[in-house]
Image: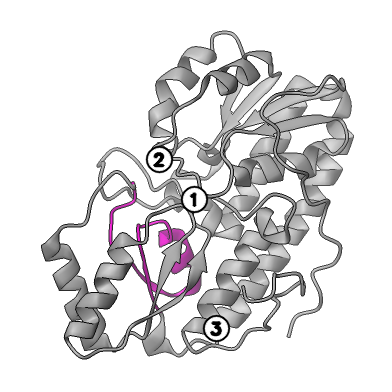
Amino acid sequence: MLVGLGAVLAVPALPVTSFANTGGLRIVATTGMIADTTRQILGDLGEVVGLMGPGIDPHAYRQTRTDILAMARADIVLWNGLYLEAQMEDFLHDLERKTPVVAVAEAVAIEDRVAHDDYADRFDPHVWMDPVLWQSVVGSVRDALISIAPEHEATFTENAAVFTKQVEEIGAYATEILATVPEDARVLVTAHDAFNYFGRAYGFDVVGIQGISTESEAGISRISSLVDMIVEREIGAVFVESSVSDRSIRALIEGAAAKGHDLKIGGELFSDAMGSPGTYEGTYLGMIDHNATVIASALGGVAPERGFAGKLSAGS
């Protein structure tokens, strides 16, 4: 087993919806993954407002009046890009005329991106599922912060290096435990296609009932064909997601039962949003730790009950 993860940088406090009058840099980040990464690099040099909390679906999210006020006051706005925040794109592009706005996930090289199933000219936006690719995003956030506060370049660079090392370690842990899952059991069935980068990184077949975007709906024929596949391949567990309805997963379980196949829920995964603020699962490292540990354990692999850092909540 790998050595311990080491000290995880500060777990963020409860999210705020507007900036406190504390001075320093003011950063807005759309998703929790970007907000947490930014906090690790920013340190105590300012404040990060995250727009999307636990259970929020970024594909369908629209900016609120409070969000608009926060972004108008920000020194820079960081978003994922790659069409993740589909309902916010027009607003963010308009905002660029007055405020620095950076799509940090678009730092991932085109050749490393996964093609989008629903749009021929776009890519799968869920790059955070592969810690190797997320290191490019860490670098993008670092460079974005340096662009607005070059006097703090040394601090941002040092903090980014520390966090990059931790991302490397959690990725190595995921590789190790997921390799213990029997090869014929390496099938990950979830509500929507958020795990394609995960599957490519760790050698899993990934099946999303819906497409990459949660806006698509799974029809009866899609559910029926997936039930047949599950029964044929003797898949024992499927997974719900914290930010997506479990309705289609329940339909799979019922369909499998009708064919005499016992299909269970292997656990809840964090796909488009992280865990609760103030918890380990509410950090990027904790999100990856949780997902890898739950998947490995549910599909017949070997993983420590409390994850790599020993910080996962009991019952994760």
User: Which quarter of the image is occupied by the C terminus?
Assistant: bottom right
Q: Amino acid at mark 1?
A: Asp
Going from N to C along the chain, the mark reached first, 2 or 3, is: 2
Quarter of the image holding residue 13?
A: top right
**Residue toward you, 185 or 258:** 258
CA neighbours of label 2 inside 10 A, class few (<14), some (14 to 19), many (20+): some
For marks 3 and 1, give the CA distance: 21 Å
For marks 2 and 3, give the CA distance: 29 Å
Q: Residue at x 81, y 78 (%)?
A: 3
**Can you tell which mark lies on residue 272?**
1
Please indicate whether residue 310 sits to the left or right of residue 62 in the image: right
Residue 113 is situated, as x and y percent measured from the top left of the image, at: 43, 50
Q: Residue at x 68, y 83 (%)?
A: 304
User: Which quarter of the image is occupied by the N terminus?
Assistant: bottom right
For marks 1 and 2, give the CA distance: 9 Å
Q: Secondary structure at mark 2?
A: loop
**Residue at image mark 3:** 297
Q: Secondary structure at mark 3?
A: helix
User: Is residue 195 rendered magenta in the image?
Assistant: yes
State the extent of the magenta-drawn residues as a range. 187-213
Q: Secondary structure at mark 1?
A: loop
CA neighbours of label 1 inside 10 A, class few (<14), some (14 to 19), many (20+): many
User: Is residue 185 rendered magenta in the image?
Assistant: no
Residue 247 is situated, as x and y percent measured from the top left of the image, at: 31, 61
- Disc 1, disc 2: CB below 8 Å? yes
**Can you tell which mark lies on residue 59?**
2
Going from N to C along the chain, the mark reached first, 1 or 2, is: 2
